[in-house]
Image (cartoon, grey):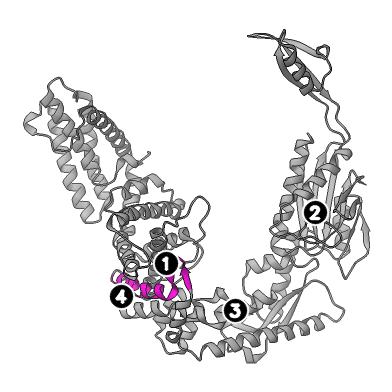
Amino acid sequence: MAELLLELFSEEIPARMQRQAAEDLKRLVTDGLKKANLDFADARCFWTPRRLTLVVDGLPVSQPDLREERKGPKVGAPEQAVQGFLRAAGLDSLDQCEQQETAKGPVWIAVIEKKGGPTSQVLPGVIDAAIRALPWAKSMRFADQQFRWVRPLHSILALFDGAALAGEFDLGGRTVAFTDTTMGHRFLSPAPISVTSFDDYKAKLEAAHVLLDPDARKAKIAADLAAAAEAEGLTVLDDPGLLDEVTNLVEWPAVLIGKIDDEFMDVPPEVLSTSMRSHQKYFSLLAHDGTLAARFALVANMTATDGGARIVAGNERVLRARLADAKFFWDQDRATKLEDRLPALEKVIFHAKLGTVAERVERLANLADVVSEFVPDCDRNDARRAARLAKADLTTDMVGEFPELQGLMGRYYALNQGEKNVVADAVAQHYSPAGPNDACPSAPVSVSVALAEKLDTLIGFWLIDEKPTGSKDPFALRRAALGVIRLVLENRIRLKLTHMIAEAAGLYGEQGSVSVNVRDLAGITRDLLSFFADRLRVHLKDEGVSHDLIQALFALGDEDDLVRLVARVHALRNFVGSEDGANLLTAYRRAANILRAEEKKDSTEYRDKPDPALFAQDEERALADALETAAAGSADCAEAEDFAGAMAALSVLRQPVDAFFDAVTVNADDAALRRNRLFLLARIRAVMEQSADFGQVEG
């Protein structure tokens, strides 16, 4: 068994593309090996800014021989069919074929034997096809070649069983030969390196100041950052995304510490961190009290003879210019009050079919007012004020430069102009929670405005029929629905979704941006509640709650209070998981199936209560009494929001229902008796459906 080592060496590949490109190269090459009937033991990929590397272990030195049997026409078939078969099989005559007996008589069988060739002769074609098929989000063409790639491709190391493969790659203007050499670090070790195996390759690269393994580079950067910060009495602000990006920017990482000029430290710390992160890829450092320190950490791509002093000085000079811009934006933005920025939102489009952001602000203020009625201890005036100011920072220079700071900068500007803390906090938090790991607001005003923001988005896009489809969700509506669910459940807000949908739709209608009629709204409401049910299933997946249980409660049409709904879901899950519940579910289905069949046959619905005077057997009377007891007990418990008790009240039905089906013939010969017994089955269905639509439960 032999090893294949492949390296594509180029100019610096964008950091965000490297991992996927290496994995794509691995997939394409291994797929090519399988098509060539070449088995292997393992395949691993690696990457640095200048190289994509793949090593495949356990390859045979030659392809295995293949024997293929191809079925042809019947013996005695027309000559035209026989000749077509021979051409397809690559044979000259039937003398090269065998006969095989089948149930329909003898047929010709072509036996095609292919001798396996040397693996070294197959690999160049596999590699060539993989390089050409490698997908890039963006690619370019270069002056001396027609082949499009992400960056200029300089060399291809292609080593099999210790020797360079014979072959080359045509770039459409020049060729790159397969070799056994690579290059080390661009500045620290630029000389060519000859290698004989992957282990030799990896060791010589490290000696040439290249850490090939991205996990090793990442671990080294993290450890060196922590050590350098600790030496300054500081800690590193946790930033996994930046750590991943910087790992793909360097081949030989060296951590250095720089200083932030004191004149910039009165700028909000989030601005400083964002500027350093987005523009310069610097790590922010924190003092022990959690405040931003006047220091930053950078990861250089080389070691310097002066200990990095010149590198640090150069980066401090660049950062000084960046932060001067940020400080200018900060000073300029504070000169204009947030409410004075609102007219500018009339020029900002929220969505072509949903109007401007200025119109949205008016809706948000009104909707936050309505929501505040359901949020305990929420001052409706504060909620309206926060909603009116929430989008104003979109017109600031700071948010124009750093869009990720929207909301947060609004809070700083609100505090600067003397707004209440609860109002300023609501401005900062009105986008939250932005994801499953984002903190959920808990302050009443923040909760009201955040709910209004997400509900306005959801209802608006439902009104214009721009809903998520499949994996596509360009307006992040699934995230908005999950945000509503988290805000409601984590703060136990007793919000009626149907009411809020109607209110939000009405606000759109008042502005005239979207036409809303009662019939359309009813359908939109049902569809949106179903969407919430689906998102609720995602939210509750860790608790083992299945979608059918949620849908069984939404299907009742009168349960859109998520706090009540979740309590009922848990009660329903426990009930159908019990022996009594499982048996009752079976009885419900039996009753529902009989009713469905008889209603279809009789072209009528059996909805009335049964007549006790027509009961002919004790089992009928016992079941009727039990049903009335269960109906009253379940309703009383549900009214008191004792949903476990409501389900337990149904348990008294198990014995009389079982006895009824064992002793009573529903389809009696007497028409009146049959009809009355169907009414009794309908009563089973009706009583149980007070608690949930058991027809939706898969159980």
Label 3 element class: helix
Label 1 element class: loop
Query: Is residue 364 rendered to the left or right of residue 240?
Result: left
**The label number, if any, that marks residue 377 in the structure image:** 4
Amino acid type, mark 4:
Asp
**The label number, if any, that marks residue 401 in the structure image:** 3
Q: Residues within 10 Å of mark 3 (few under 14, many from 20)?
A: few
Q: Relative to the observer, which residue lies in front, 504 or 144? A: 144
Amino acid type, mark 1:
Leu
Q: Which residue is drawn at 82% across and 72% down?
A: 302
Separation of disc 1 and disc 3 at Cα?
Answer: 26 Å
> Residue at label 1?
354
Of labels 1 and 2, the one closer to you: 1
Of labels 3 and 4, the one closer to you: 3
- Dominant secondary structure of the residues highlighted in magenta in the image: helix
**The label number, if any, that marks residue 53 in the structure image:** 2
Separation of disc 3 and disc 4 at Cα?
Answer: 37 Å
Label 4 element class: loop
Q: Relative to the observer, which residue lies in front, 84 or 422? A: 84
